Structure formats: structure tokens, C-alpha cells
Image (spheres, helix red, strand yellow):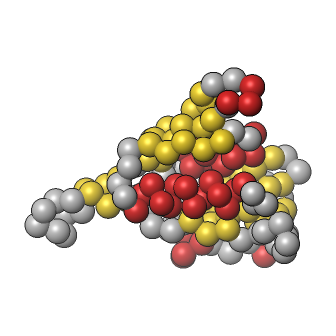
Amino acid sequence: MTDPITDMLNRINNALAVFKETVEIPFSNQKFEIAKILEKEGYIKSAEKKGRAEKKTIIIELKYQKDNTNKNKKEKPLISSLKRVSRPGQRIYTSYKNIKPVRGGEGIAIISTSFGLMTDKEAKKKKLGGEVICQIW
């Protein structure tokens, strides 16, 4: 696997498509930080580490919202799209001046700064630029 973050986003996207409650992802510190940001921003219920050594995984509990427009009162995923911006073959960097709101402020971008991973809003407030990892809306 050449890009573990894309793999993580694809696993979440696939689990949301079939309305799974949880998704299991191989552990890495960066993926765990991304999951914690998603939890803090309210896109997922929880993210926690399980196991130890080589068997360490991240268990993400997904979040759905009631769809009142449908007669069946079905649930729909809170996340409608996960998009990988910076890839191993093409890194995308931005300064804090060039950070634009995702989907008119409805979504978030996760940016890797010199002070760690943070949302686009936090990075702009702290006047930090960095690598744009992904966008969620």
C-alpha cells in the first residue's frame, strides 16, 4: 500500500456507503490524529486505539443523521465526501493566506502544520500554512 491515508478515507467511505456502525483501520499516529480531528469536529462518534504492537488498530464509530425528507425516516451519513488532496506523488502546500473555506464553510480541510495536524479554521486563526492532507464535507 503506497498511501495509507487514502486507504483510511476509502475504508470510512465504504463503511458509510453500507451503513456500518464501526470501521477498523490499521494504526498509525497520523491516521489516529485525523480520526481525533473528525471526532472533535462531530463527523464521527468516536475513535479509539485497540491492540498492541503490530496488531494495533483504530476503531472508528460512525455517525449518521435522521433523514426527515424520506417517508421511511432512514438515516444518512453525516459525511457526504472524503477527498484526499495531497498525495505521495503530488504534495499540495498552502500558506495561511491562501486557505479557502471548504464548501462555503460547510466542510473542513485537515492541514499538516509545523505544530501538528489541525483544521483549516485553526490553521488560519494561528496563521500557519502547511500540507493540505484532505477535505471532508
Q: Position of residue 70 (x, y in %)?
A: 17, 68
The foreground one among 5 and 63 is: 5
Residue 23: percent from left, percent from top = 49, 45
The residue sitting at 66% across, 42% down in the picture is 26
Q: Which residue lies furthest to the top in this view?
A: 52
Residue 135 point in image, percent of width and height: 63, 66
Looking at the image, which residue is at 40% across and 62% down?
Answer: 17
Q: Can residue 23 be seen in this view?
A: yes
Residue 25 picture location, percent across and down: 60, 44
Position of the N terminus by quadrant: bottom right
Residue occupying image coordinates x 19% and y 63%: 68
Task: Say whether residue 129 is left or right of residue 50.
Answer: right
- State left or right for residue 112 relative to residue 27: right
In the image, farthest residue toward the left:
71
Of the pair 15 and 33, the residue shown nearer to us: 15
Question: Does any portion of residue 97 appear in the rendered image?
Answer: no
In this figure, what is the number of numbered marks?
0
Q: Nearer the viewer, residue 89 or 73?
A: 89
Q: In this view, does 58 lie above or below 132?
A: above
Q: In this view, does 75 lie to the left or right of 53?
A: left
Location of residue 107 (image quadrant): bottom right
Location of residue 93 by image quarter: bottom right
